[in-house]
Amino acid sequence: MTLDRSLTLPCGAVLRNRIAKAAMSDELGDGRGGATPPQARLYERWARGGLALSIVGETQIDPDHPENCGNLLLSPLPDKTALRDLATRATQDGVHLWAQLGHAGALAVPVAGRVRAPSAIEAGGIRAEEMSAEAVAALPMRFAQAAANAIAAGFTGVEIHAGHGFLLSQFLSPLFNRRTDRWGGDAEGRSRIVLAIVAAIRAAVGPAVPIGIKINATDQLEGGVTERDFLRTLALLDGSTLDLVDISGGAYFPGAKAASDGAGKGPYFLEAARKARSVTGKPLMTVGGFKTRAQAMAAIESGAVDVVGLARALVLDPDLPTKWIAGEDADPTFPRFAETIPGGITAWYTCRIASIARDGGNNDGTDFGMSLEEAVERVEGRRAVNATRWRAAYGIDEDLLGGG
């Protein structure tokens, strides 16, 4: 059986099989960066479903640059006890739990004045100031402190978020990184901060803790990351102490195409993973487009990837890993909507996640009777509440809340 084979990472840690829950923002934090009982139940439920690894996305390295005010905060830790409870429940039976370390950069909800990015940005309603060289140089230790806090709380590893248009993805992109100092320029210069962050985290957590990275094969933006850029960065990272490369794509910027555009049927980034094999010996994972057991089996058997990342499929059926490993062709039934609205499908899955967190959910998302309009209304309402709480805790200027 392909999917049930264990995988020993370069640091010596062992994943018990080849199925991971890819990072998703569950938006179940308490609005101050703390974990909640529903969030602990959610990750416990996924652990019981038979996977090898859950990645919590995105967890914030500081309170000033959140991607979402419902996310966890790792530095400072607002509630150590609640975070330890989440980690304990999510790591039963040898399941790994990794914190995806994030800084949203130009896509951050504004907290302390205008948001910051590698270079100044003012386009499509997004405004950001260029980070000073001193602020960039301070990033490795900030990521390292967040990683150390996560491990102390019971997480078994971390994933650096360098994809989807957030800060480190912005550094890697020639479209957003126009710096002329050591943190910009060619692919080597643009990758320098990521390499420094990997080294700082390794020094902070020691040799035996897994460190992964999520990185874009493409950001789907004209003038952005090219295949050559992607492969050059991976070649540089091959000399680091990374343990897993998680290949993804796309960006939450105006004008960016969806990750599925041009991918055809099936998983989106397998071809990028195959090309990555030519420049790195690191274990590879990819996420996006896996809907059937046959697709997951083929991806591992072909050697394209070592780990299959599932996201929405595990929202529809948390027991999918157990079923697939047992040989059941129990593929989830993905919902179809006659008409879509902006943000509606993502909101529907976010509400489905909340349902699992409340009561464990059922094994068939098709009977989760919520319209896209209702889902958007619920998610937007929750985000407003969380933004108010985050503002009260960390001093967000109310006039800036809509500016990022």
Image: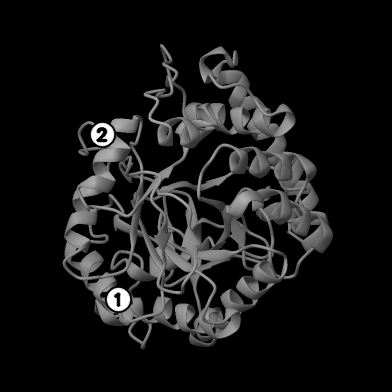
Rendered-image quadrant of the N terminus: top left
Q: Which mark is residue 238?
A: 1
Q: Nearer the viewer, residue 361 or 386?
A: 361
Q: Residues within 10 Å of mark 2 (few under 14, many from 20)?
A: some
Where's residue 351, x and y in %?
62, 29
Residue at x 75%, y 57% (from the top left corner): 83
Q: Nearer the viewer, residue 384 or 370?
A: 370
Where's residue 200, x and y in %?
52, 83
Q: Nearer the viewer, residue 297 or 56?
A: 297
Q: How is the image coloured?
A: one colour
Can you say whether 126 is above or below 156 in the image? Answer: above
Q: Residues within 10 Å of mark 1 (few under 14, many from 20)?
A: some
Task: Indicate the quadrant where residue 332 lies.
Answer: top left
Task: Indicate the quadrant where residue 310 lies.
Answer: top left
Q: Is residue 199 left or right of residue 271?
A: right
Where's residue 78, x and y in %?
80, 62
Residue type, label 1: Asp
Query: Can residue 269 be spotted in the picture?
Result: no
> Considering only order in the chain, which callout, 2 or 1, is on the residue closer to the N terminus?
1
Q: Which mark is residue 266?
A: 2
Residue type, label 2: Gly
